[in-house]
Image: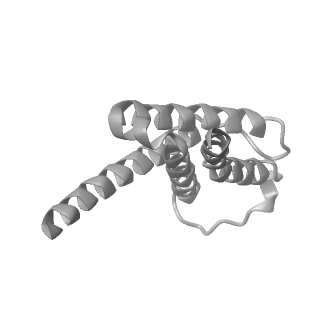
Amino acid sequence: MKIAGQWQNRIRYLPVLLVMSGIFYLSHQPGDTFALPDIVNIDKLLHCLVYAVLGISFYVALSPQWRRDYPLYAGSATLIFCLFYGILDEWHQLFIAGREASGLDVAADVGGGMLAVACERVWRIWRREKTDEVV
């Protein structure tokens, strides 16, 4: 039984690795590859949304008991993870033709992590109120 539990813990990180792989793939494309709509700061919005998905997948991968017992630490770990992966992503882009590193992109990445944590908190509050109504 203990081995099955260890695999279950590791499998929870698979979505995190998939999202990280997707971000790495997109970051590895030359700068002239993308044709984004002509909307002001659309790239920052996309960074925020993609990192919100990364943040949610990371948060869910954490131990459910740890998330429940230490929600502040779990949220902080999610933000720090998004920050470090955002920095790593920007550093990676320095080596790709037509790409550049941007501190504003990292800020948008952390904003996505904040969005993920905020969505999770709102979800928990909504679920708690929903179960209180049933009782």
Indicate whether 77 appears above or below 19: above
Residue drawn at x 37%, y 54% is 119
Quarter holding the C terminus? bottom left
Indicate whether 111 appears above or below 22: above
In the displayed structure image, the side of residue 4 where residue 130 appears, left or right: left
Q: Position of residue 107 (x, y in %)?
A: 50, 38
Q: Position of residue 15 (x, y in %)?
A: 64, 53
46 vs 35, nearest the viewer: 46
In the displayed structure image, the side of residue 11 where residue 73 appears, left or right: left
Residue drawn at x 75%, y 48% is 27
Q: Position of residue 127 (x, y in %)?
A: 27, 60
115 vs 96, nearest the viewer: 115
In the displayed structure image, the side of residue 65 where residue 107 appears, left or right: right
Q: Number of numbered discs present?
A: 0
Residue drawn at x 37%, y 52% is 120
131 vs 54, nearest the viewer: 131
Residue drawn at x 14%, y 67% is 133
- Quadrant location of residue 70? top left
In the displayed structure image, the side of residue 66 where residue 17 appears, left or right: right
49 vs 29, nearest the viewer: 49
Q: Position of residue 22 (x, y in %)?
A: 72, 54
Quarter holding the N terminus? top right
Asked which colour scheme the image uses, the reply is one colour
